[in-house]
Amino acid sequence: MKHVANWALNVAMQRGASYADVRVVAQRNRALSTKNGKLGNASDTESVGMNVRVIVDGAWGFAASSELGRGAVEKTAAEAVAIARASARVKRADVQIVPEKAAVAEWSTPFKIDPFSVSVEQNIDLLLAIDAELRSVEGVTLAETNLNFSREEQWFLSSEGAEIHQAKLSTGAGYAAYAFAGNEIQKRSYPNSFGGQWQNKGYELIEELKLLENARRIAEEAVALHKADQCPEGKFDLILDSSQLGLQIHESVGHPIELDRVLGMEANFAGTSFLTLDKLYTLRYGSDLVNVVADARQEHGPGLGTFGFDDEGVAAQCTPIITNGLFTGYLSSRETAHTIGLNRSGGTVRAEGWNRLPMIRMTNISLLPGEKRLSLEQLIASTDHGILMQTNRSWSIDDKRYNFQFGCEIGWEIKNGKRVRMLKNPSYSGITTEFWNSLEAICSKDEWTLWGTPNCGKGQPQQVMGTGHGASPARFRGIKIGSAFQGN
Amino acid sequence: MLTREQAADIFDRVKKFSSAEAVEVLFSGGRFALTRFANNTIHQNVSEENHVISVRTVFDGRTARAITNKFDDESLRQAVQASERLARVQHSDPDLLPMAAPNEAAGSATGGPAPQPAPARHFAETAAITPELRAEGVRNIVVVANRHSLTTAGIFSSGESFEGIFNSRGLSQWHTQTSAEVSITMLAQDSSGWQKSNSPSVANLDPLRLAETAAQKAVESAHPREIPAGKYTVILEPSAVLDIVGFMFWDYSGMAILDQRSFLTARIGQKLFGENITICDDVAHPLQSGSPFDGEGIQRQKVELVKSGVVKRVVYARATAQRMKRSEHKNSVGPIEPTGHGFPLPNEMGEMPLNIVFAPVDDSQSVEQMIASTERGILVTRLWYIREVEPFEKMLTGMTRDGTFLIENGRLQAGVRNFRFNESLLHMLSSVDAMSQPVRASGEESFDMVVPAMKVREFNFTEVTKF
């Protein structure tokens, strides 16, 4: 594919680009699902194409095509240049990109079992077995299961001499049981909502998740929720399981630290951020226990935000975002890094596919575990009166990322260190910085999970991206609970 | 763009490569370009061209799909083989129907009235929009921002697309259309305003008017006051109505009833909304957009979903209609017939109405008239990040955004800090005191619809944010 990229680079530079990069991308995806004992979806998708991104006259242009013949590729490159010239008609200053040493590299996701090598029969049998187990519990009215595998191969070449070939692999799986009775629909998901757990690894993830082993418990909880008490309203200590805490990190840390948002580039759609530039190194984002990193390196784990190089050819890095509660870093790109005084991009730029412009995306935005050994059961045992919430059900946050409200699938009231009753329709709300400053205990590494969020939307046209979020269960002091049902 | 004739040729090649008892190919794609601006400058400017085919094969009640964007013989052969491999290993599904024949697709097989043809939705002027024309449009928007000392961000996009379906029973459907869209945010120090519009024809867009309105909202909502959360009379502009009501239409599906995941389960025929709410799905409506056939090639019919507050019926794909006729719900869900709203097979969701039209209003009021008749209330320009909190009462949460105003004594008094709402759609649509005439509206939380502005009593705001 290098020759395809070189055709485009040559045309772009000949036509006046001061910088150009090309990505040639081949994606393959397999999706299998069942619903109530029948196959719901069975599809294989392949998409191949290329794009050219250029700076001409100090402005950006981008064009993409599924055609990889020389004529089509050169036409696409010429179109990118023409688009950049049109961009230059409405600019206030020339685009600046910080330097990056041109890398020549190969990188691929480590895996043990290629998921595409596992027979479809085996996968369908697994899903149908889970489905049957869920529906064997009386009161379950709908059972859904899913498996997803994807592979992306990308060649990145730039006019600065970068030549990077990457192959990324991801696997996802999960299921949900619904119980409809009276005037209520209750739901439980495993291992998480959003289609379960997703990581950049092979089929070994499916074996690690113990899907079938947990199906009966999940189905029984969905039915039991109908007899559970409504989650009370008021201020309580709140314990979040690691999956819900992962989404809390995503929404109230991951998005506001995107530097393009901060600079107003997303104002029309995704919004802006309360984290204005004056807050770097000055804002107490959270309590002293809060340490958050943006880490795309393999050593952080097989998150959906793990890679060798980003889509600007910048190597994966770890950036401290919150350090002992102090706000210390943004997610940056080659275009935005200089605005916070950096001379190198943080390497966080990714695109959904060959036909989308790379932009700042969360990598693995993770809350580091507590240093003292603390299990979830010990955390519960040390709680006088609080509410434990598990597995996200609804999520919403304002367009500057201040006010949030989350609903979870199931809650448990804790009194004197013990779970005393199940609670249905639990929800909590707050203001981002007040919430993180109320964190008072966090479980240790053995409770830490690197969750995958496969459905993060951003950009115009909108792009969906997978992001990673590591978290251990944690306790927050005096949180507003139950306001979702206030007044209804 | 791919033509119908080229698609027919590709379909013939696919058929030759397949050993399945039936084959279907969906075609989609086109050219799309989007000029994006922020901080009064064009900062992103993209175009793409892509053509995709999706091959479905069937063997004895088993079906699967493979998708590719490569049309050479080898790629087509691989797609066919991938689809056949996935299909062959499944268990046979007795509910899988034979692919639709041409007479069934046209609606004649159901015995119902033939659907009204959708108007032409491909406009040469829109297809011919260049990057230079979009840049010029953006420049004019920036001029408005500068005149008001504001910062602007937004998009101007254009494109042309096709959708087609061919199957081995002789069905063939093809649709082309163009689209243009403008979305504008105007930002001041502590306030903002927003407007958005799209249409198959760029001639229907008025970017300067949108820019002026967004600017006016930003200026007039400056220095927002914080007022307490609570229940307020609220005037929702059409985009806000679209964003929130869009969350219920997944439930107007026969499959959702069968799955017992719809809030309409055991409720069809009941008066769930106010007398003044009448809603249909009508792809042929002149303000609507999209293709006139569904994922199996069946012509989309006009379906009356709600009349005078009473839920009348839901929409059906072919197989869902067949299952519903055998189900315990068959006597309580109104008419059961394929309506042309199915998704491509195989899928889990069945069908959904995607061309929502609220009925014209006899005693309509403009937004200005609604404001004038409001003693104390809130005007909402736009809603954001709406999610379902409770599925059976359709309780939704979300935020106001980009132009939220306090109304007192019939006048806009000031901008206010944005609210979080937790509101039941059943309550909201039972509490509508006034509506404007419906317009084609566009938002970010739901698909485009023809909806009115609404004045709603006791809308439930539960929290206030910091801006």
Image (tube, helix red, strand yellow):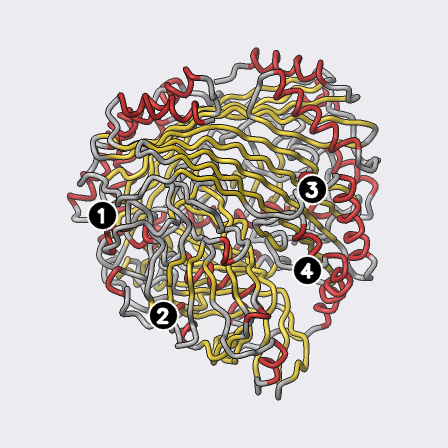
| Closer to us: B96 or A150 | A150
Mark 2 crowd level (few <14, some 14–19, many ≥20, 10 Å Cα): many
Image quadrant of residue B138? top left
Please tell me how many numbered marks the rendered image carries: 4
Against A190, residue A368 (above or below) is below
Labels 1 and 3 positioned on one and the same chain: no
Instruction: Give the amino acid at mark 4.
Output: Ile
Asked whether the viewer can see residue A321, the reply is yes
| Residue B449 in view (yes/no) | no
Q: In the drawing, what numbered circle is on residue A185?
A: 4
- Between the C-alphas of marks 1 and 2, the distance is 28 Å
Residue at 22%, 47% (x, y): give it.
Answer: B151
Across and down, in percent, residue A45 comes to: 61, 33
Residue B151: numbered disc: 1
Q: Are marks 4 and 2 in contact (CB under 8 Å)?
A: no
Q: Are discs 4 and 2 located on one and the same chain?
A: yes
- The chain to which mark 2 is attached is A
Residue A181 location (% of width, % of height):
74, 62
**A98, A388: nearer the viewer:** A98
In this rendering, would B315 be left or right of A338? right
User: Badge 3 local density, few (<14 within 10 Å), some, or many (20+)?
Assistant: many
For disc 4, the neighbor class at 10 Å (few under 14, some 14 to 19, many from 20) is: many
Report the residue marked by disc 3.
Answer: A32
Q: CA distance from mark 3 to mark 4?
A: 25 Å
User: In what element is the residue under mark 3?
Assistant: strand
Tell me where residue A381 sits by quadrant. Answer: bottom right
| Residue linked to disc 2 | A285
Sequence-wise, which precedes: disc 4 or disc 2? Answer: 4
